[in-house]
Amino acid sequence: MTQPATPQPDHDLTEAARLAARVLDEVQAVFVGPREIPELLLVSLIAGGHALLEGVPGVAKTTLVKAFAATLGLSFRRIQFTPDLLPADITGTYVLSPRDGTFQLREGPIFANVVLGDEINRAPAKTQSALLEAMQERQVTIEGETRPLPSPFLVLATQNPVEQAGTYPLPEAQIDRFLVRLLLGYPSPQDERGILRRFLGSSPAPRTVLSPADVLRLRELAAGIHVEDEVLDYVVRLASFTRDHGRVFLGASPRASLALLQAARARALLAGRAYVLPDDVKALATPVLAHRLVLTPEAEMEGLRPERVVRQALEQVGPRRE
């Protein structure tokens, strides 16, 4: 028995792969680094998720997000998180209109298709929580009134994992809202030379490749990607491995399993395939699952990383062949 899905015409899949390749080419005209990084942003967009980018200052996290948003033809807003940022600074607030004496909503920067939350861990928990409803429900509640957010909606947040002074670690409930976490390290010497050479001249600007309608169509196509029961079983057994691991306090939840499946569907679409392969699950397991795991205090003291737990799962759990 297999999961029911709507078969996708081959020409639609081919066109989806072509559009995806154009987006990645445009992003890499600005961002010099592994193609897998912008590809994971595109996977997040198509899967209907959000992405958390971690890296030290100066590794082009913001540049990457801006370039990615520019290729999509979507509205884009940036929120600079600071300790004095208030929830109303994100969602908006009602202000008195002097002209007619009524209160009108002044929408905050959350009312955009793509929202960059820069240095998200610099704002206190109360402000961070303003994103929870938006990321999960695609809506915000302002003074008792619920308002829908634009569709498609994508939050791309950045944080510096090294500097801890003046920061507020994201709670597990917030981290779980991010489909993937991307770790941006220093570029290789070859890539760094490419960065210097590229920016000796005028700064390149990516061209718009997709429209909002294109993004929604890609999401529709991804929802029809076929998934065999063997792949579903593989996802479940990977998640179960993290829950049963002796050094994991909090393992991957069913939401994490669903996120991995949705991301795998999106990756298959980017490749122009109508079905998910176990390799799709393997490629996405670490960026989708690792940030959701909470290790025991003893494991953390010994230096064990969640990424290592996911690698152990991939090494010890293989897809079953019927």
Image (spheres, rainbow, N blue to C red):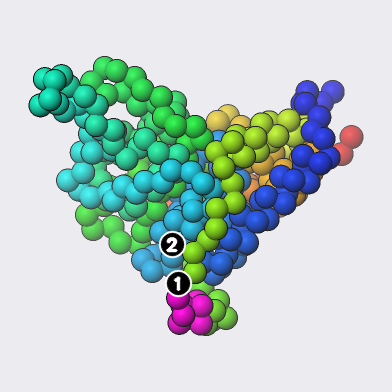
Q: Quadrant of residue 136?
A: top left
The secondary structure type at the circle numbered 1 is: loop
- Does residue 157 show up magenta in the picture? no
Question: Which of disc 1 and disc 2 is earlier in sequence?
Answer: 2
Residue 296 vertical position relative to residue 71 in the rendered view, above or below = above
Residue 287 vertical position relative to residue 292 in the rendered view, above or below = below
Circle 1 residues within 10 Å: few <14, some 14–19, many ≥20: few
Going by the numbered disc 1, the residue's amino acid type is Ser
The secondary structure type at the circle numbered 2 is: helix
Tell me whether the residue at label 2 lies in contact with that at label 1, contact meaning CB atoms closer than 8 angstroms: no
Quadrant of image for the N terminus:
top right
- The answer to which of 52 and 11 lies nearer the viewer is 11
Quadrant of image for the C terminus:
top right
Residue 298 vertical position relative to residue 148 in the rendered view, above or below = below
Q: Which residue occupies 51% across, 73% down?
A: 187
Instruction: State the CA–CA distance, disc 2 to disc 1.
Output: 11 Å
- Residue 202 falls left or right of residue 33: left
- Residue 224, given in percent of the width and then of the height, sits at 73, 30
- The answer to which of 211 and 59 lies nearer the viewer is 211
- Residue 143, given in percent of the width and then of the height, sits at 23, 20
In the picture, the disc for residue 203 is 1
In the picture, the disc for residue 63 is 2
Range shown magenta = 195-202
Q: Which residue occupies 54% across, 48% down?
A: 72
- Residue 225, given in percent of the width and then of the height, sits at 75, 34
